[in-house]
Amino acid sequence: MATTAADFNWAGTAIPGGDFPCINTSGSTIAVGSCVLVDATNSLTTTAFTGFSGGMPSPGALLGTLNAYPMGVAIENATAGAQFRVRHYGIAVCFATAAVITAGDKVSLGASGAVFTKSGVNPTIGQALNTTSGTANDPVLVMIDIANNA
């Protein structure tokens, strides 16, 4: 049975130490529920970054892209340059691409930080805990279990 947005605990489930601060270095807003990537050009450093003259106090994060290796899931909205929390361990609400995701499927990153059922050797963000209807932006509860080529 497919679930709807009304069926969700939107906070997900945190595990102690599973959430950590990042800085949105993408130049645009990252929405809650979006998968994010490490920004290798803006990692922890003493080099100044806009709004943080003493250096990067947290790693930079970019919006997830198709089949990229994920860092975690944004658990709050982040405007460009803002600090926000990313869930690396635990359960988080993500958003599906337009394809159906079945509970138990391993999921990979689609375009714009959404998720879809893993195929081939793409990196995964985790395992879906609900079935979606196949509509773009359907909420999908994901047990985060980041793996490369798994």
Image (cartoon, rainbow, N blue to C red):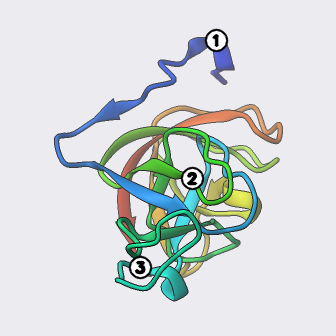
Question: As shown in the figure, which amino acid type bears the numbered disc 1?
Answer: Ala
Give me the disc on residue 82. Answer: 2
The residue wearing badge 1 is 6
Q: Which residue appears farthest toward the front when viewing the image?
A: 53
Give me the disc on residue 148. Answer: 3
Total labels drawn: 3
Query: Is residue 8 at all visible to an observer of this figure?
Result: yes
- Horizontal and vertical percent for residue 80? 68, 57
Residue 91 or residue 28, whichever sits in front: 28
Mark 1 secondary-structure assignment? helix
- Horizontal and vertical percent for residue 46? 35, 83
Instruction: Please state if 9 lies on the left or on the right of 82 as rendered.
Output: left
Q: Which residue appears farthest toward the top when viewing the image?
A: 6
Residue at image location 70% in from the left, 63% down from the top = 110
Q: Earlier in the sequence, mark 2 or mark 3?
A: 2
User: Alpha-carbon neighbours of circle 1 within 10 Å: few (<14), some, or many (≥20)?
Assistant: few
User: Alpha-carbon neighbours of circle 2 within 10 Å: few (<14), some, or many (≥20)?
Assistant: some
Q: Mark 2 or 3, which is nearer the eye? A: 2
* C-alpha distance separating marks 3 and 1: 32 Å
Residue 139 or residue 10, whichever sits in front: 10
